[in-house]
Amino acid sequence: MTATVQIVGAGPGAPDLLTLRAARAIEAAEVLVWTDSLVSPRIAALAPRDCESVRTSSLTLEEVMAVVLERARAGRRVVRLHDGDPCLYGAIQEQICRLADAGVAVEVVPGLSAYQATAAALGAELTIPGLVQTIVLSRAGGRTGMPERESLARLAALQASLCLYLSARHVEEVEAELLQHYPPDTPVAIGYRVSWPDQWLTVVPLETIARVSRERNLIRTTLYVVSPALRADQAARSLLYSPSHNHLFRGGAG
């Protein structure tokens, strides 16, 4: 393989939440193939002035790959720019397979995901000792469907910090399913375009997420973070920094 395509994560939206590696890739791009329906134009604008910009919101996978392959084979530096982290609901596997079949190498550059940006914006930790230690990233079934072993009911039964992507269109069913496993007053962060200039972020009881979502007309670019950690006892603390806890780098009082 000689040609290389970079699949780059644009993060949640704010340009200053790009990784350094992602920013450098965009700034060096000769061809930017970007998901304009989801990636901030402010991030695409970091590409050089003479960079060819290809918007993909109206293209099929075949059309996108035809552009990427033609430009890569011509020796141009191609950046395929995805929102968030491309490894999470980024549909990159099918792109990587097509590129590999064509003899084109791929470098994947990770990006900050919306659940991380949401927790940061709230000043919250999603793994609180003694309360919740697991984060689940998932989605409502929708047209894509879900394997039965990953049904929302099974995931909700964990009562972990549950981060749901791509689920706003199905929020009534999501709420009804979650209420079978979480208390009605479980806090849920609803984040719309987190880190964008028009960000909207609030925390509401689980039993109201459908109503609030419909009142705001949320149908896309929305994340739900369902977590008892969002109302954690302020006295909760980990063992890591406890004076009574021994570990490799510090002796303890006990």
Image (cartoon, grey):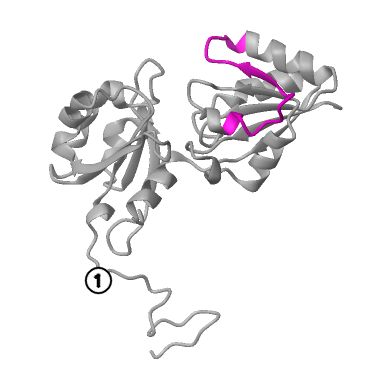
Q: Position of residue 13 (x, y in %)?
A: 48, 36
- Tell me where residue 52 sits by quadrant: top right
Vertical side of 1 occupied by 197: above or below: below
Residue in the image at 39% along x and 38% along y: 194
Q: Position of residue 161 (x, y in %)?
A: 32, 47
- Look at the magenta stretch and give its main secondary structure: loop
Task: Count residues near mark 1 (Cα–Cα under 10 Å), then give few for <14, some for 14-19, many for 20+.
Answer: few
Amino acid type assigned to the residue bearing label 1 in the image = Ala
Q: Position of residue 14 (x, y in %)?
A: 49, 40
- Tell me where residue 42 sits by quadrant: top right
Quadrant of image for the C terminus: bottom left
**Residue corresponding to mark 1:** 235
Residue in the image at 33% along x and 51% along y: 122
The magenta stretch is: 43-62
Q: Position of residue 142 (x, y in %)?
A: 34, 19
Vertical side of 172 occupied by 69: above or below: above
Q: Is residue 49 magenta?
A: yes
Residue in the image at 86% along x and 27% along y: 2
Circle 1 — which element? loop
Residue extending farthest to the bottom is 253
Vertical side of 232 occupied by 117: above or below: above
